[in-house]
Amino acid sequence: MNHITRWRRSAVWGSAGRGAPSVAATIGENLPAPTHAATPSLFKQVSPSRSCTGRYSFVSGSGRGRQLSCADAWKGFEKTLVSEGCTSIPRYPVVARWRNDVDFTAAGIYCFQPHCVTGEADPPANPLICPQFCLRFNDLDNIGITGRHYSGFVMLGIQAFNSSAQSKPALSKDDCIRVNYKWLTEELKIDPDEITFTEDVWAGGGNLGPAVEYFVGGLELGNMVFMQYRTTGEGKLIDLPLKVVDVGIGLERIPWLVNRTPTSYENAFGAATDFLRKSLELANPPEIWERFAPYSCQLNVDEAGDISKAWEKIGALVGMKPEAVQRDIGLTKDLYITLDHTRSALMAIEDGALPSNIGGGGNVRNVLRRTFGVLHRNGWWERLGMDGFMRLFDLHRSELSKIYGPFAPHRSFRKIVELEYDRWLSTDDAQRKQVEKLKKQRKGRISLGDWVVAVSSWGVPADRVAEMVGQPVPANLYYEIAAREEKSAKVVEELPYGTSRFAETRCLYYESPGMTEFVADILGIMENKTPGGKGTILVLDKTAFYPLSGGQQSDTGSISIAGENLEVLECLKAGKCVLHVLNKSLAGPLASYVVRTTNAHMSSIGKTRQLQDRCGPAIPAQLPPHCRPHNQRRLQVRAGSSRLAAGRQKDRH
């Protein structure tokens, strides 16, 4: 998972007028000043502490005279942004098959990386907005406590791609800030004096630029990032040819802010919350939540430092011992964990992920097994059973469909969950012996690192480890697991080929998944520049060869050019083009092979086809080729001959 480093400017700006703001100032010591100028009449300088007071000042329980749902909040956002020229597009899958460096879509911008942000592929619209469901598994320890953390949430994204070739920016910095301000004040009816803007510098992946965050009542509501520069090893800043605007807003926070409920969880899950409370005979949040919730922001595991001291501080603020606070909020916290984890597991499995011990599947397994542990520990499973558990998933689907539309039938969903539950119940003897041996080696008390190994490497559920070693689950266990996964995260291998000069490859494997032969024009020919690589690389105007993507191996086969048969060893995606790696170099000048005619013919000798059961949702027609998930195709073919013809065969693994 790619995380972005952030450092904060000393100046923080708050709105002091009803007009739309224009944020400015120098962007860190080494960054040039932005082109827009501050408007003193609209801003006042305030203390940096205003944006993070250690308290949610908006939490009251009294409301504003209206109750806003997540679906209504999205519709209001969509209405405002579309009126300002943005195009609303459907969400992308949460399983990021178009990327080789991450397992899940953790932010809206992930959908457009790497190729749209480099200009190699065109985005589906510009500027655009999208209610992207995101999965992040580094905050599991915070869920149910801080009021705002989720493993799965909806990020309202605004993305724009500003090129120097455009007559004017698709969305400028000033316009981006203006439309966000308009949405806050006109659609959400937030008093301008309650809004605080802070200007930061964000950097990541070798790029950086200014960022503007906005807070209301101590809650960060949105973050606007303006990537403008590329950094060199010597620390120089180079203007990016394509400047990207990336705005992220947590949808679940909007009803929380407007409704003034103790936590965002009360608004996020709709009928699923009522069903679970009724089934488990749980009352609404006890009175302690009214006193505890405003200070819950201090319990973020990755910011609090000593979490026990944070609990002591909050206990003093609410007039209770910290142990008593934790006890009294416990059942409601577990309710929120159950609601969050089941919704995240639903979206992951619906989009093609499966529980396992490795990679992204390990995260899906963790949230499911943690949920099973919560339900059994509290005696709730006896009340729900598997039928009630499945009903909870159905209610999540119903609530999310108000934003995303109906879910397609998934005939294997229940079987997947039942199998994972059975496996959780029967932690095998080998795993148990491993933990017992570890406990003996550690003289009865295992370390945080031991917990990480047992849960993430051996696949032992955390609650089972707790039973075996007689220790509570560490408060920062899942944060530590995520941090270690981040250190060993996959790095995208950059291909040494520029493809921006070529037209986008037409992907026949999406149009006709059963196609085994085709004719095409050669747009470009390049020598293989990979270490030890041999042969020629072809760029065609269209192809039925599926390239390496999302962990799925590419198709192979043969291609015939001017009567010469050549093997296609693999296919790679580079920007908007598919590269066909041949087994040997072409004879003669490469330019002589570039043709613009399609009067070639190819005959297929044989083929086989195997269709997968179901590995994710149908491919939405609106998704651009750079990020469509591959979920249906397996072919085998041998090609005949022609001046330019191609066929593909089943990948072998």
Image (tube, rainbow, N blue to C red):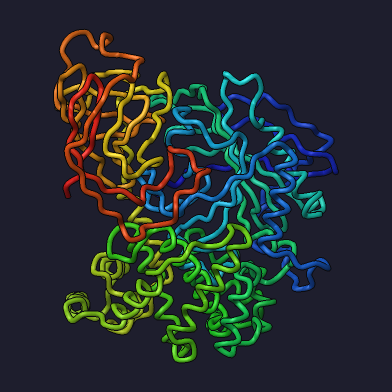
**Residue 536: where, in percent of width, then height?**
21, 21
The image quadrant of residue 460 is bottom left
Count how many numbered circles sit on residues in the image: 0
On screen, 555 above or below 313?
above
In this rendering, position of residue 135 left or right of residue 272: left
Regarding residue 363, the answer to whether it shows in the image is yes
- Closer-to-camera residue (390/197): 390
Residue at horizontal 71 percent and vertical 34 percent from the top: 175
Regarding residue 481, the answer to whether it shows in the image is no
**Residue 601: where, in percent of width, then height?**
26, 25
**Residue 258: where, in percent of width, then height?**
74, 62
Residue at horizontal 38 percent and vertical 79 percent from the top: 472
Residue at horizontal 51 percent and vertical 22 percent from the top: 241
On screen, 326 above or below 63?
below
- Closer-to-camera residue (495/3): 495
- Closer-to-camera residue (378/451): 378
Residue at horizontal 15 percent and vertical 12 percent from the top: 587
The image quadrant of residue 399 is bottom right
On screen, 14 above or below 151?
above
